[in-house]
Amino acid sequence: MENPSSSSVQSLNASGSSRVHVGNSYNITHHHRKGSEQDSVKKYLDALRSTDPRDDKARIEQTNGGLLKDSYVWILESPEFITWRDESEAGRLLWIRGDPGKGKTMLLSGLINELQPLTKLGDAQSSNTISYFFCQATNSDDKHDKDHWNSKVSLERTFRKMVDDTTPGEIYLLIDALDECFEDLPLLLALISSMSSRAKWIVTSRNRCEIEELFGQTSSKVALSLELHEDSVSEAVNSYISYRTRQLADRKKLKKSTAEKIHDHLSQNAHGTFLWVALVCQRLERCRAWEIPSQLVQFPQGLNQLYAQMMDRIRESDSCDLYMSVLAVATTVFRPLTFAELIAMESLNIDEETFPDLIVECGSFLTTKGNTVVFVHKSAKDFLLKESSHLLFRSGLAQHQYNLFQRCIAILQSLHKDIYGLFYPGVLLAEALRNCPNPDPLDNIKYACVFWADHMREAYKLFIQDEIMEDFHGADTAHDFIVEKFLFWLEALALCQNLSAAMKALIILRDLLEQASYKELIEDALRFLYLFFSVIEDYPLQIYASGLLFSPHNSLIRQRFQQHTSGVFSKLPKVDDDWTPIRSIYERLPDIDSRARTISFAPSSDLLFVTTSFALFRWHINQEPMPKLIERIKRNSNQKMAPSPDGKWLAFTSSGSNSESAQISAQRALHVRDWNLNRIIWSKDLQDRQVLGMGISPDSQCLLVWYDEELELYDIKGAMPQRWPLESKDRVIRFSFSSDSTWVALNIQRITVSTIYVFNLRTGKRYWSAKNEHIGKINDARFIPNTHSLMICTVKKTVYLWSVLGEKFETWGHFDHRVVRLAFSHSDSWLALMDHSRLYMYDRSHRTLLQVNEVPFMKEIGVSFDDQTIAYLTHDSICLLDVQALLVGKQPKRRDGFMKLQTKDGDGMKSDSQEYANPPFIHLTCSPYSGVEYDVEWIKFDDKPLLWLPRQYRGNTLAIEYDLIVIRDLYSIQFAQGADKLMRQALQNLT
């Protein structure tokens, strides 16, 4: 239900390059949802909401001298608009296109004004809704959207839920400047063009071929070219000229003859361009009344000519170098800078209050939006880059980018430990932000924190392009910064809510730095970030607590920053010497009761897909610190889905019921969706059949679907070249494709009997071996890479090898441990066997054990195609293992249980460490010393998180007595004297 008395206005980030303002989206926020879904949507909208778009609309109009109805009223009588307004099917999309400066934004603003009275904003009884969006080319936003689902998918879902709502009435969606949505333009275009619902769209853009190409496939589109409506646009511009002339005459108290001269000159030289008129009038407003006639005739025709004149005037100024420097920075930064950031970047001796005066002097290229410096129009930035780069970058663009990199590093020298002065190690991010000092010490350095490495990368590329690499010394500068400021930088990024920027920067450095010692440092920094990312993101000061306490002794980061360990602790735990093979752990899998799970790598080895019963994750493991949730399935929906290995398409079933009370919803249809274009490629009515499982071939060309009594194979276009019958008692447990995508093996469970069927996907022939039914229950069966042979593991701790074509079935090995899953290296060098708590690495050729590693609760396993990473699933997490570290590392001491811990009154903590065949399981109660207690992942103080424990340091054998904490494996931590008083004082100081 909707709340008619409230108005929902949000601001969305269209993931990457564009700012999207949303107004009056009632249907987005006022549906009642239950449980975690409602909480997730609330978090999503809270994270997205930043400004009221009505204020942004007003600002845009004010920047252009106000919105004149006569400048847009012509479009209301145009055939294109009438078709869009009156015809329900033929005109669901009105695309307004035109060259820069033709008034597209103001035209859309006028249409918003005309449509609003027809919606809830103008009539509370109306069933119509309106949402409007202003895309602005403001480059990357540096705020991390960690509190909601992947922004691209969530934005799409928000749109679709809104337009698919069954509430009567029209839904008007208006988007300005599609061409300024750089990074996600294909997604947005696909979203608009694929809408077959009752939503009515109006969009504006420049004349861009990719937009025309995609919209050309939309049958219900009406295109309105401003160039083809030249007469109407000219009349609108003339009305705008009259309006601005009257404004100027009233403000300057001009004579009628002077006003007429202004009107005539503007009319003769505007050539149908609103922006030219607006810029000229802005310049005239700065003149004294008697100067206007002489200044007027000096303005040239055309936007570029006007921009050129503005540059000439800047060059003639006594402060030319200052203005040029500001323009150069504004042109090359990755997002608009705030006053404080630009002052810091330029080391200007000027305060923020008078800074707008400086911007005014920059030739009308720049303006201000709140306390941020932005271009008056994208064409102004385009002109500076294309026509005036030789003036802005006198030492070359390469040197300019290098200078920006150096300035960023210089600015970041002010970083230090606990920059907000909070002291307590377990301060939550939200608490830290509430207790931010005034002024915020990060205000002027946020940009530098996020983008310093990007400027280094740009400089590096340009130095190579210009063949002047001998002048590039960025590697030394970057190395020194990491050595001196790494942890302080991570803290600052966490406080800026953009810790993921550290991952991006370190990857840039890893790719650019060539010296071995430099690479070693960066790899160590990455390991630190991978392990502690999730806790630092929410608890920034855990960098100096958990991060420094539990990183290995030989960690370069630990060694360099050990003196900055939290002052709460005086005795540090005994930890491993080196990093474990565990490269990263993601512990936030939702719905831990999920059962059906798969894990698979894309051929690129960088992309990992994980499916659970209720979610699908995608993880670029070398670029992202954690996976992104890209699909969520409602409970009881019985929905199935399978991602293609190349990451280009998704197969999924849709449910026939959205009822929350339904026990299990019937599947309605099978769909294949293009992920990049977000468009359904094909759909198939299931006709009351239920899909029990799906899989996509390694070459991403075929989809295998099994039902109760049938197995079907589809190609990517939806054709069905093969079909095989299955018996009703056959239950497909697992499947495996051959590397060349020509064979598939199905592990079939028949009550108490397991068997394997192999199907040739080209010929349709089915293979089966009678020996399958005499080897016991089959846990797993997989094709060996680059062969047509299967390896099969059973509950009898035996692994078999079946050469399907050669009809050879033999025992490969018998083991003294269980084998529940298996995986292969793609280079045929090793084989991984797993039970539920250990991973065994075997040499394939010699069948010898290479390594054993503890991996508790392992359920599924996958190997990257480059053999560098093993990914596995536990009941609640995704873990990445470094294969080289696995193979060369020492075998850990095997422990079959927990160690015995004893306490002795008045003599601290005593412990007894030894192997037990059946070790005692002892629950130790915590001492009341200083309010310290243990709670799964955390040591707590006065019920507040104090110290986060990485997974390997958790367990039931943890005890606290007096000021000593003893953790399993005899890792002990001691509090500093008086630490409890200091911590309580710090907590009391928090608001």
Image (tube, rainbow, N blue to C red):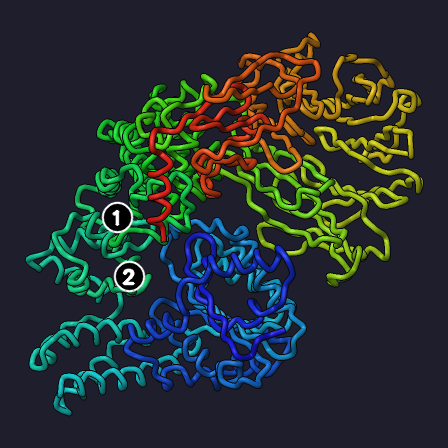
* Most foreground residue, 529 or 882: 529
> Can I make out residue 864 in this image?
no
Residue 349 lies, in percent from the top left, at 12, 52
- In the rendered structure, find residue 31 and report the number of the disc placed on it: none
Residue 245 relative to residue 574: left or right: left
Question: Image quadrant for the C terminus?
Answer: bottom left
Outermost residue to the bottom:
256
Q: How many marks?
A: 2
**In which quadrant of the rendered image does the N terminus lie?**
bottom right
- Is 253 located above or below residue 719 in the figure? below
Q: Position of residue 47 (x, y in %)?
A: 47, 57
Question: Closer to the camera, 502 or 805?
Answer: 502
Name the residue rendered at 30%, 57% in the picture.
Answer: 382
Q: Amino acid at mark 1?
A: Pro
Left or right relative to 737: residue 271:
left
Residue 555 visible in the displayed image: yes
Q: Residue at x 62, y 21 (%)?
A: 898
Q: Residue 441 bears which disc, if any?
A: 1
Dot 1 crowding, Cα within 10 Å, few <14, some 14–19, many 20+: some
Q: Which residue is mark 2?
A: 375
- Does 721 sit above or below residue 952? below
The amino acid at mark 2 is Phe
The residue tagged with tag 1: helix, strand or loop?
loop
Q: Are marks 2 and 1 in contact (CB under 8 Å)?
A: no
